[in-house]
Amino acid sequence: MQPHKTELGHAELHTPSGALDLRQRRALILCDGKRDLDELRLLLGSDAATLIAGLQREGYLATDRPAPAEPHRRSLLAARIYVLDILALQRHPTATQLHRVLQAAREDADTVQALTLALRHLPTLTSEGYTQRVQARLREVLPQAQLAAVLEPAPLPA
């Protein structure tokens, strides 16, 4: 258990209302979400658990952590913009053509097809390591539904 200040606890420290005595205020300051109850007991004394429980009851402290941030949303549009930027950096006529094709794609199916085509040509335009980094980034950004279609390895037509 690592107690941390609630909004009420932060407000009490910034503008004291006089509702807390010096010992409670000290406990409130020390409860930063990083110290566990054993460490607080060393700093506050043997009745630290009672003191902290009282501050929790009054709403100054909480032991639950906020929910972790939601992972970033996956987006076909973000993948499209990313690959457009990658293609714009390549100084090759094929990259320019692929850029135009991807830029002209308006429907999801056309975008997926253009992304797939661009990724199949990318190894011929740049290094293997760079291609792998682009693919890794697309694994993070592309929606699950389009991942397999875009990233499945398929050879270029001869």
Image: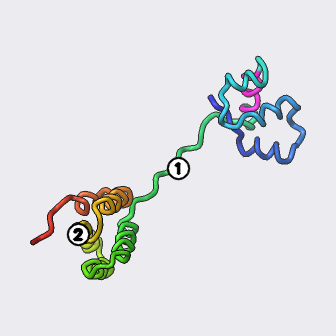
86 vs 51: above or below: below
Question: Which type of secondary structure does the marked residue at label 1 adopt?
Answer: loop
Nearer to me, 157 or 76: 157
6 vs 86: above or below: above
> Is 54 contained in the magenta span?
yes
Q: Residue at x 72, y 26 (%)?
A: 40
On screen, residue 111 versus residue 154, left or right, reads: right
Nearer to me, 87 or 79: 87
| Other-residue count near label 2 (Cα within 10 Å), few / some / many at <14 / 14–19 / ≥20 | some
Image quadrant assignment for residue 1: top right
Instruction: State whether the magenta stretch is mostly helix, strand or loop.
Output: helix
Does the rendering let one see residue 42?
yes
On screen, residue 104 versus residue 33, left or right, reads: left
Q: In the rendering, at what x and y percent does residue 140 appear? A: 38, 56
- Where does label 1 land, which residue? 69
Quadrant for the C terminus, please: bottom left
Numbered circle sitting on residue 138: none
Magenta segment range? 48-56
Residues marked 1 and 2 touching at CB (< 8 Å): no
- Where does label 2 land, which residue? 124
Does the rendering let one see residue 143?
no
Q: In the rendering, at what x and y percent does residue 150 appear? A: 25, 63
84 vs 64: above or below: below
Q: Earlier in the sequence, mark 1 or mark 2?
A: 1
Please state which amino acid type lies under the numbered disc 1: Ala
Please state which amino acid type lies under the numbered disc 2: Thr
